[in-house]
Image (cartoon, rainbow, N blue to C red):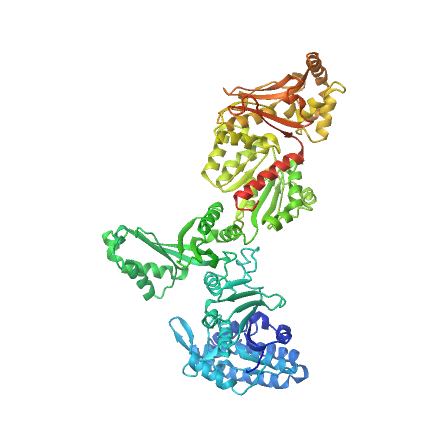
Amino acid sequence: MNSSLPLIAHKFGGSSMRDAERIRSVADILLARTGERQIVVVSAMQGMTDALIALVRQAAAREPGWREALDQMLQRHIEAARQLLGTDSAPAIAWLHKEFADLADVLHALALMGTSSREALDLVQGLGEVWSSRLLAEHLSARNEAGAWLDARDVLVVRAEELGVMVDWARSQQAFDAWIAGKDLRRLVVTGFVARDLHQRATTLGRNGSDYSGAIFGALSGAQEIHIWTDVDGVLSADPRLVPEAVLVTDLSYHEACELAYFGAKVIHPQTMAPAIERNIPIYIRNTFRPELSGSRIGPELSLEPPVKGVSAADGMALVNVEGAGMIGVPGTAERLFGALRENGISVVMISQGSSEHSICCVVREQDAERASAALNEVFALELQRGFLQDIAVQTGISVLAVVGDGMAGMPGIAARLFDHLGRGRVNVRAIAQGASERNISVAIDTRDASKALRVVHAGFYLSAQTISIGVIGPGNVGAALINQIAAVEERLKREIGLDLRVRAIAGSRKWLRAPRRLDLSNWKTEYAELAESGPTDLDAFAAHVHADHLPHALIIDCSASQGVAEKYPEWLAQGIHIITPNKSAGSGPLARYRAIQAATRAGIARFRYEATVGAGLPVISTLRDLIDTGDEIHSIEGMFSGTLAFLFNRFDGSQPFSALVREARQLGYTEPDPRDDLDGRDVARKLVILAREQGLAIELADVEVASLVPESIRDGDSARFMDRLDAMDAPMQALLDAAKAENKVLRFVARLTREGHTSVGLVALPRDHAFANARLTDNVVQFSTRRYASNPLVVQGPGAGPEVTAAGLFADLLRVSAHLGAKV
């Protein structure tokens, strides 16, 4: 194939050769590449190899349907020939008839004998490549493209060895050179998968053999590049079936590709790369269906960026652990262990041993687990009998997860990040292995955690967005505002900082909306409104949906005021579900429940964020925590903790009745659905309890002295009846205002917490120059008097009411949790 043009080897898989349309597309791809010579290796039509194997078994079993199946196979190829060659198809069809007649004779002989043989199976199962490659070669000729067709069985010689099928390179190179001698070919089409053995019998290269033969003929022909054409865009950073966010890896080394392939990546088999690695031929993984993409390049050069190229997992494994004090310092124990496995034909996938030599564990394929256990119990029978070994345990249902990248070598922190993210995803690691090359860290985990582990580690190394499964409880004013805020920025967060906030469920008290992947937040209100009520929402089912096994992180945002939902917090936190809430029931409810929530948070890895319970969007709790954690001493806390009451008393100047202001605040969404929850001071008291408990004070809500603004005469009845009788507040409130004005003071509703733990909530008259007297309309104002801030208290001030402000506080907590999980917030 002498020419000044570069020689490129191309290999097309079964999906690329599925039918006449796809074969024509293959020809289009080849003909569009005008600046090269080509050696083209192809697979059989998709599904053909399996069909031929089935045909052999049917005939050998004397099943009557094998002739009909053979005829259907022939008709499939004849139809492809007609579509590809048109009026010139007769010679090709005649050739197919002869091929299938020969095959029918072989199958008939098997039926007569009632049995098959390895040689017969090897002969038959490789015929699909012979037929498909001949059709491609004939089609190229019909398009006036010069070329030739080579049956690989004429030149490729292989032998079976313990490690698999091995190429006899010397004989194969000599035969190929002799075949090609004197031919000035621009394009050569070659059968994949098939070869001959040392006795000149037809054989195959085994599974993945077509890709292997592509690399073999690339090596035999001296190709400058090998292009493997398949149905994916290239090598991906993870299995897209398990990690839909997997990204294309454009460049990787031979070493990286081998590691990924060994641990489950399906794009290319390590054996395929061997001939290319030996000759430093770069391999390109390309998509037949998207030929305009450049795909992935696998080459000899180390590729250090990014340091982690991919994450893969191999399922169907078992963990074998040999343990006992009698192993310590005894030479030859490992040799006996692995020798026993070798003698029983059991391949070891991964090995891990502690430096104490007290145990050795290894991972084998699950189908070998029983044989491995039997072999080891036999070889160590004496040690087990005498108690030198305590146990030989086999654990099935294991997967091996591998993190791979040349850039991992010498880079501190890679292992730390891996185990950090596995821990945050609540994935238990059973065994660990890392080679001295540092380009692979492998861990054995339970198979039920494999999908979640892949996702959390993949996102942890910024190979994809950090995904958080979110459920929202309480789609009222605050909940709706939060959902809309997430909808407004979710695409930007995913694009710019790699954070995928997936709202997958929205629940009210009697119905809930859900989606397997994510809800359409542009239309959630309509969908939710159209749902029929179905009784009390099953909170366990809701949490189970949010806490999906295939997603790395789960988070519930409780925007309700429900005691029942707050009761679920300890259980959800223990399950690893993060919780964010403005629901004051959790922090101010029964002390036993509060302690259970805190204990669950300390014991697990789930975060409980509740900043919005006190100051909506203001950093009140975080400021208090900073003071305590840095060693300051709290003397007192005073505050206007209600944006609702701040609004009312900033506006209440006597120009209009107090009841009119309450009605206006309710219409604006500043009050609770029942305004008595604001006016009676209980909402402020709850916030004060939360702050007191944050300091370690063991107080209950009943311990707070609360001076309610609601007259005794209108405290009973439902919300509607209260609103009807609201005017009863006007006279007493006006009297209080007049008294304050007489002293040149203003009315403010203030909460106080002293150093001794005394708590009080009520209406007070303050001088007009007091910090609380000059707050803006709905501002919350919190004043911390501490050892450091004694003469000039620390003040936190800002809007403390309204759905948008509270939702913004929740969103800020959501981003803080996301940062904890590894998002680049």
Q: Nearer the viewer, residue 435 or 610?
A: 435
Q: In the visual, does 327 lie left or right of 421?
A: left
Residue 510 sits in which quadrant?
top right
Determine if residue 115 is in view: no
Q: Nearer the viewer, residue 674 or 588?
A: 588
Q: Quadrant of the C terminus?
A: top right
Q: Residue 157 at what x, y percent from top left?
A: 44, 80
Residue furthest out toward the right: 655
Q: In the visual, does 389 lie left or right of 510?
A: left
Q: Nearer the viewer, residue 642 or 45?
A: 642
Q: Residue 649 at what x, y percent from top left?
A: 69, 22
Q: Quadrant of the N terminus?
A: bottom right
Measuring 45% from the left and 48% from the top, which residue is drawn there? 416
Q: Residue 572 at what x, y percent from top left?
A: 51, 39
Residue furthest out toward the bottom: 182
Determine if residue 416 is in view: yes
Q: Residue 369 at what x, y percent from top left?
A: 37, 59
Query: In this rendering, is residue 768 above or below 538?
Result: above
